[in-house]
Amino acid sequence: MSTRHENTKEHLLETGRQMLSCQGFGSVGLSTLLKEAGVPKGSFYHYFQSKEQFGEALLASYFSQYLAEMDAIFGVRGASGRELLLEYFSRWQERYGDCLVIKLGAEVADLSDAMRMTLEAGTDRVVKRLARAIDAAIADGSLPAKDSQLLAVNLYQLWLGAGLLRKLNRDQAGMEATMQLTRHLLDSPAS
């Protein structure tokens, strides 16, 4: 596949991500997406058989990028595992609006089983990364021994809920309370 073709596909995915994060899946029509991207309809169908397949690819791309960002945060040297976990959640607090799981999860889960499964697989991978980061914090002594998988699931669900309520309430208080609870849940042995 040529670079030009790969760039067109990536351009469609990035344009779609920007539009869907603001408007949702159902609100963005194919013609609107193509007009915004400046791409002819035939080019879209060269890469994607349907809008649903485009949605799957967009979510897969989103999770790839998101997981790479997690790896970059948790790969920082010289900080404790607890500090890295708090940095991750601090960034979530700043960027909750970019979360396609919050924006699209409930909407597409009932529309497309394929997209739902992509979301499920992606969120499972996020939780596994969190559990590994919690294990690293336990190993370096910055967290007491805990069930890392259970804590990862609980933290992820807590932050998804907080992000959704932040969108509904349009205020930051819930996110700040969620960060306080996260700090409590990630108390170090010396705390």
Image (cartoon, grey):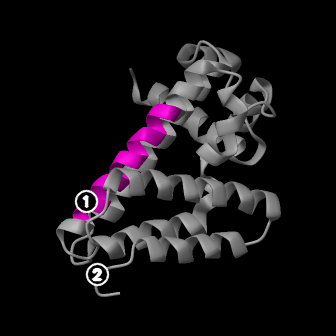
Reading the image, the residue beneath label 2 is: 189
Q: Looking at the rendering, which quadrant does residue 108 occupy?
A: top right
* Residue 69 in view of the camera: no
Let me know if residue 121 is in the magenta part.
Answer: yes
Residue range in magenta is 120-136
- Residue at 48 percent across and 67 percent down: it is 89
Against 93, is 115 above or below? Answer: above
Residue displayed at 51% across by 41% down:
62
Report the side of 162 relative to 120 (left or right). Answer: right
81 vs 154, left or right, is: left
State the image coordinates of residue 26 (x, y, percent, origin top left).
78, 30
| Residue 25 in the image: above or below residue 41 | below
> Which structural element holds mark 1?
helix
Q: Is residue 118 above or below residue 128?
A: above
Q: Amino acid at mark 1?
A: Asp
Residue plotted at (46% across, 76% down): 183
Q: Position of residue 125 (x, y in %)?
A: 39, 41
- Of badges 1 and 2, nearer the viewer stands 2
Query: Can residue 123 be seen?
Result: yes
> Residue 135 got which mark?
1
Regarding mark 2 in the picture, which secondary structure is present there? loop
Residue 37: give x, y in percent of width and height.
68, 36
- In percent of width and height, residue 82 lies at 33, 73
Amino acid under disc 2: Pro
Going from N to C along the chain, the mark reached first, 1 or 2, is 1
Quarter of the rendering containing residue 25: top right
- For the point 44% across and 46% down, the residue is 65
Quarter holding the C terminus is: bottom left
Query: Along the horizontal axis of the image, is 134 left or right of 119?
Result: left
